[in-house]
């Protein structure tokens, strides 16, 4: 099963992410926020900085697009996955340069256990926003579920290099360390 997943091309995008330039469509304020977030002890709380990044990722000049994304997120949160899917499909068709629409569709595919679809949408998210620590950690979770432990480990390390304040990823990395795994 895992061999049919398009892991390698997405993994390559993740490995190249530190040298890739984000889409010009992204708000320029993100650059300052990512620099601040990368500090081990930023002046403001890491949660506040993360919230600002997620807000900017979720913003769009088209107000209807923002409302559609919010409706899709609410549908996912309430378990109405069949309602969310056409909304997200519409957004990625109408706004193919919006990284967060792709990321939310990747999240939905992951929840629905459509891992190949999730990976394709993660790849598009990362082409537009190579610093998307959520998409990179999502890739790691897909890899974990499918037994690609080395790729999961590397993805979590790269996500942590972008956002060192993701304690749950640090815990997952500890659990994935070779001395914690029973190898047969």
Image (tube, helix red, strand yellow):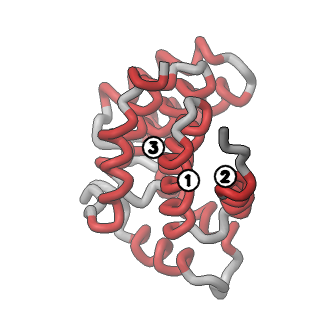
- Quadrant in which the C terminus appears: top right
Would you say residue 58 is visible in this rendering? no
Seen as rendered, the residue at the extreme front is 184
Circle 3 residue: 100
Whole-angstrom CA distance, mark 3 to mark 2, is 28 Å
Crowding around mark 2 (Cα neighbors within 10 Å: few <14, some 14 to 19, many 20+) is some
Q: Which mark is residue 153?
A: 1
Q: Is there CB contact under 8 Å for labels 1 and 3?
A: no
Q: Is tag 2's residue or tag 1's residue first in the polypeptide sequence?
A: 1
* Residue at 62 percent of width and 83 percent of height: 40
The one of 13 and 39 positioned closer to us in this rendering: 13
The one of 14 and 4 positioned closer to us in this rendering: 4
Secondary structure state at the residue bearing disc 2: helix
Would you say residue 86 is visible in this rendering? yes
Q: Is there CB contact under 8 Å for labels 2 and 1?
A: yes
Secondary structure state at the residue bearing disc 1: helix
Q: Is tag 1's residue or tag 3's residue first in the polypeptide sequence?
A: 3
Q: Which mark is residue 81?
A: none
Left or right, 47 with respect to 50, comes to: right
Q: Which mark is residue 176?
A: 2
Q: Is residue 136 above or below residue 31?
A: above
């Amino acid at each position: 099963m895992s061999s049919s997943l398009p892991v390698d091309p997405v993994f390559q995008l993740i490995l190249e992410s530190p040298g890739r330039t984000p889409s010009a469509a992204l708000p320029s304020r993100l650059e300052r926020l990512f620099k601040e977030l990368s500090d081990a002890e930023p002046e403001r709380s890491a949660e506040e900085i993360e919230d600002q990044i997620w807000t900017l990722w979720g913003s769009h000049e088209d107000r209807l697009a923002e409302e559609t994304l919010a409706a899709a997120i609410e549908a996912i949160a309430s378990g109405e996955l069949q309602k969310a899917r056409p909304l997200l499909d519409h957004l990625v068709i109408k706004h193919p340069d919006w990284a967060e629409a792709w990321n939310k569709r990747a999240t939905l595919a992951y929840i629905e256990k459509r891992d190949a679809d999730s990976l394709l949408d993660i790849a598009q998210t990362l082409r537009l926003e190579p610093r998307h620590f959520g998409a990179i950690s999502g890739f790691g979770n897909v890899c974990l579920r499918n037994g690609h432990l080395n790729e999961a480990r590397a993805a979590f390390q790269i996500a942590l290099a972008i956002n060192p304040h993701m304690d749950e990823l640090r815990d997952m990395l500890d659990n994935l360390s070779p001395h914690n795994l029973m190898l047969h």
